[in-house]
């Protein structure tokens, strides 16, 4: 299940991996920074739980992540390149009636894409994200770039040790990821009113990494906020996360 089923051309023709689970109504899910489709959506049963409701779960590996290409050319990382990759995936799949979601960086990307009119899903799933995670990106980027730059010097007693170990386990290409971090832009909060489709905001009860998910749900025109156990990194590794999404989506047959 963790092996890419296929590739599709991202922005600039960069080959990106796509994983599929299930059959039925399409649901596109984007993973978080330094992670992968397998780690965020497949490993802990989330894709399987959603597929059991009659959905085909479509999960790309973002550029510079996992099975997707990680070019070292800075030209492969223009502003908002992940939004361009997402729009390219939707066009490649030829889907018009679908649901869309993401966790952390993936959530940030889909909110940007919808607010800017690049994609128009029927429903939206936002995991591990608050209003604060949509703005002041440069401060967060500087944090991650510093982590990359001192990667080899991080010791076990360093607060960044667990993050560095996670990057190592995911075989993160630090050159490519450094370029990617420079491609993200802030999303003005005043654009959130454009996101009019029904939205689920799901966050761990101890997850404050990107601000308040409840605040984000309140800023969206038609959103429901659900808490699940865990913090930012641990909530996505608990089966309650996928079950909450599957329950909110409901049976695909009910939408026919």
Image: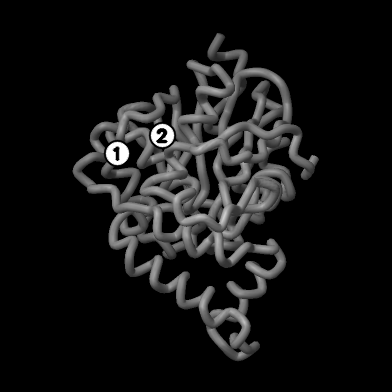
Spatial CA span between label 2 and label 1: 8 Å
Q: Quadrant of the N terminus?
A: top right
Identify the element where label 1 is drawn. loop
Q: Residue at x 49, y 37 (%)?
A: 11
Estimate the x, y position of residue 207 in percent, counting from the top left. 47, 62
The mark found on residue 79 in the picture is none
At horizontal 56% and vertical 32% (from top left) the residue drawn is: 28
Judged left or right of residue 215, residue 39 is: right
Query: What mark, if any, has residue 220 been given in the picture?
Result: 1
First in residue order: circle 2 vs circle 1: 2
- Image disc number at residue 199: 2
Which quadrant holds residue 156?
bottom right
- Few, some or many residues within 10 Å of mark 1 (<14, 14–19, 20+): many
Question: Which x, y percent locates residue 73?
Answer: 51, 55
Q: Are marks 2 and 1 in contact (CB under 8 Å)?
A: yes
Count of numbered labels shown in the rendering:
2
Q: Kindly tell me whether residue 102 is visible in this rendering.
A: yes
How far from the left and from the top, in percent, is residue 53?
Answer: 67, 25
Where the C terminus falls, by quadrant? top right
Residue 76: give x, y in percent of width and height. Answer: 48, 49
In the image, residue 133 sits, relative to residue 155, either above or below, namely: above
Q: Farthest residue in the left direction?
A: 190
């Amino acid at each position: 299940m963790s092996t890419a089923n296929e590739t599709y051309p991202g922005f600039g023709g960069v080959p990106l991996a796509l994983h599929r689970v299930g059959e039925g109504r399409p649901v596109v899910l984007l993973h978080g920074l330094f992670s992968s489709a397998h780690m965020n959506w497949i490993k802990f049963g989330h894709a399987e739980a959603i597929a059991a409701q009659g959905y085909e779960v479509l999960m790309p590996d973002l550029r510079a992540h996992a099975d997707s290409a990680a070019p070292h050319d800075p030209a492969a990382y223009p502003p908002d390149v992940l939004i361009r990759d997402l729009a390219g995936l939707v066009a490649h799949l030829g889907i018009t009636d679908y649901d869309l979601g993401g966790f952390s960086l993936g959530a940030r990307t889909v909110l940007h894409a919808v607010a800017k009119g690049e994609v128009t899903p029927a429903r939206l799933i936002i995991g591990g994200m608050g209003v604060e995670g949509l703005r002041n990106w440069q401060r967060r980027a500087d944090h991650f770039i510093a982590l990359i730059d001192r990667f080899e010097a991080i010791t076990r007693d360093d607060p960044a040790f667990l993050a560095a170990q996670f990057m190592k386990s995911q075989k993160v290409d630090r050159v490519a990821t450094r370029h990617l971090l420079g491609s993200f832009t802030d999303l003005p909060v005043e654009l959130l009113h454009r996101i009019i489709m029904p939205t689920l905001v799901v966050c761990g009860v101890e997850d404050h990494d990107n601000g308040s998910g409840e605040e984000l749900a309140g800023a969206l025109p038609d959103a429901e906020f659900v808490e699940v156990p865990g913090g930012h990194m641990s909530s996505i590794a608990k089966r309650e996360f996928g079950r909450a999404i599957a329950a909110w989506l409901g049976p695909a047959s009910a939408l026919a």
